[in-house]
Image (cartoon, coloured by chain):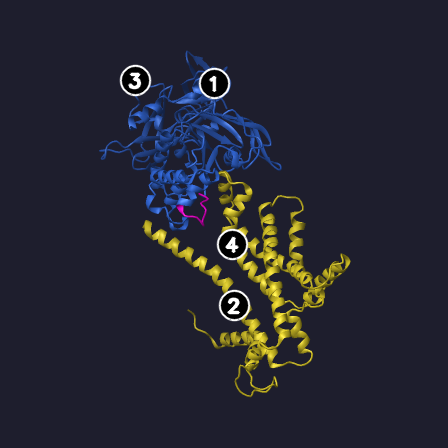
Amino acid sequence: MEKWSRFNVASVVLGFGFLYLPIVLLVIFSFNESKLVTVWAGFSTKWYSQLWHNQGLLDAAWVTIRVGLLSATCATVLGTLAAVALVRYSRFRGRVLFSGMVYAPLVMPEVITGLSLLLLFVAIGLDRGFWTITLAHITFTMCFVAVVVQSRLLSFDQSIEEAALDLGATPVRTFFAITLPVIAPAVFSGWVLAFTLSLDDLVISSFTTGPGATTLPMKIYSQVRLGVTPEINAICTILIGIVALGVVVASIVTKRREVHRERDERAAIAAIG
Amino acid sequence: MMKSLGSIRRSFAPWADPASKPFISVKNVTKKFGDFTAVDDLSLNIYTREFFALLGASGCGKSTLLRMLAGFEQPTSGEIILDGQNLAGIPPYRRPVNMMFQSYALFPHMTVENNIAFGLKQDGMPKPEIAERVAQMLKLVKLEKFAQRRPHQLSGGQRQRVALARSIAKRPKVLLLDEPLGALDKKLREETQFELMDLQQELGLTFVIVTHDQEEAMTMADRIAVMSHGKVVQVATPAEIYEAPNSRFVADFIGDVNLFDGTVIGVEGGSLRIETTSGIQLRMASPEKPASGAKAAVAIRPEKIRISRQPPDHAPVNTAEGEIWDIGYLGDMTVFHVRLKDGKVVKASSLNAVRAVEDPLGYDQQIWISFGEDAGVVLKD
């Protein structure tokens, strides 16, 4: 290991400080005794217990979780199918256009995605509420799933699919018995990503929501306009916790597989020698 | 047991019998990928229980042909008949053939046992029978102890045997092998070659193997098809391919060869007189009698050329004087590069049958080379 120079230490501190200082402040003040957000008056968890009595926040949280679970699941199915089609059938006409179109929503301004979805829902006369938010979230998260799954499929040895076909499995059976189990970690990572994206989306939800379907970010945003309360800090801390847990779980799943594999391979090599 | 296998092998030559029907018939098959022609109007017959090798450099179309037999590619034109059935349009999962992949293509998320059972399950075979067949296969490839391992917990050689067991578990009519030994080291590869041959005899299957390794093809195959640029150049037994190549390409591709370019200057009985471009006159046996003045090339393998310190006494037909230019000691034999008077360098090899030679041939030594009139073949081009 090389020695850390002062310059390197400074760079790291500055960089991470820039990234995490606001979040750390938020987490610290969620444990503040005082009602004033900017004045520290001692440690307390009272704002967390008060959350359980704020029916509005709890309802919003419940809507958010339902939207997240449903949209992440649908987006994972659609995104995986799109990724498989794009990687496997690389010779079909218009592939470049199609793959570009899958990725476009990644860079599309959310305002535009939200507005266009709103226009669509109005045009087809769909009542706005829980289902429109869910549909909108499926739309914008599926391309993230497609990207994650596609990158896994690119390093996938296609001959194992051919071997399955050769041994008498139909293409559909091959997909479920061979392809899907092998790419499962990537599909799971895609699901976690879609879920967290859905969890913290504000813009698209605001455009496509209707009466009775307020998600947590929308609720927080509207409350903040009336002034930040430590309660908001508390709920945000919980959200951060959930998202961080999701990311950590997803990366551990991927990492553990790799570590296992490497260890087994080393063992196999040692056994020959 | 081994003796009877040998006798089967010796007498096995269905291709020479006009009454026997081919098991696989490839008829005028062409395969194009865009502008590139991978297989070009190719026809072949392969017989039941034959060990057939497709041999060629990479990109010669041999793998594409194999993949068409497996059903992963469809011919652009022409047809493939297997046991009387036209394979056109039949997907890989409905063909009575199985393939062993170059990368082995083992299912990484399944145990060795489940890998082998996979094909049997697809056929809806009852469970006890599957278990019995899997156990039989594991025994055959000597992997009984590894049934519960995953592929990444195995060595390369073990993986290769799992791939083999999986591909023969369904008792296919034909087993296709795509460079099956390519990933093994030399020693293991040589052992496995003989194992594969014994296995093929034991199971009575038809094997079609793709390889770029000529020794592998020569060792294992009953017949070899030498391919180049999507076409078959010669189909024959290993001995015929080696001793009687039908073209310059085959002569040069298989083993080492000395080629003398020249012109036919006359016919004497069953032999041709040929004058090489450098002025040496050679007399070679040839069933064909081209007219004088026709271009011809004489191909002679290095081990068919004799080296002597004195001019040979009872004059073999062809002799030439030269000096030793280079010596390559290979252990089992020594290769001499002999520079003839006209400047042409000829390779001659001799077996090192004795451990210590009193007065070995040295550099720059004046010697004579000689060979009989049937030591080589006359090629038309």
Start and end of the magenta stretch? Answer: B104-112
Q: Secondary structure at mark 1?
A: strand
Residue at 55% x, 42% y: name it.
A171
Report the magenta stretch's main SS: loop
Q: Classify mark 2: helix, strand or loop.
A: helix
Asked whether B105 falls inside the magenta stretch, the response is yes
Q: Chain of mark 2?
A: A
* Three-letter code for the amino acid on which mark 4 is drawn: Ala
Look at label 3 and name its amino acid: His
**Number of marks drawn:** 4
Q: Is residue B122 visible?
A: yes
| Mark toward the start of the polypeptide (3 vs 1) | 1
The reply to whether discs 3 and 1 touch (Cβ–Cβ < 8 Å) is no
Residue B325 placement, left or right of A44: left
- Cα separation, mark 3 vs mark 2, equals 93 Å
What chain is tagged by disc 3?
A: B
Q: Mark 2 against mark 1, which lies toward the viewer?
A: 2
Which chain does the yellow colour mark?
Answer: A
Q: Nearer the viewer, mark 3 or mark 4?
A: 4
Q: Distance between the Cα atoms at labels 2 and 1? A: 86 Å
The residue identified by callout 2 is A245
Query: Mark 2 packing: few (<14 Cα in 10 Å), some, or many (20+)?
Result: few
What mark, if any, has residue A184 been given in the picture?
4
Report the disc number at residue B217. Answer: none
* Amino acid type of the residue tagged 2 in the rendering: Leu
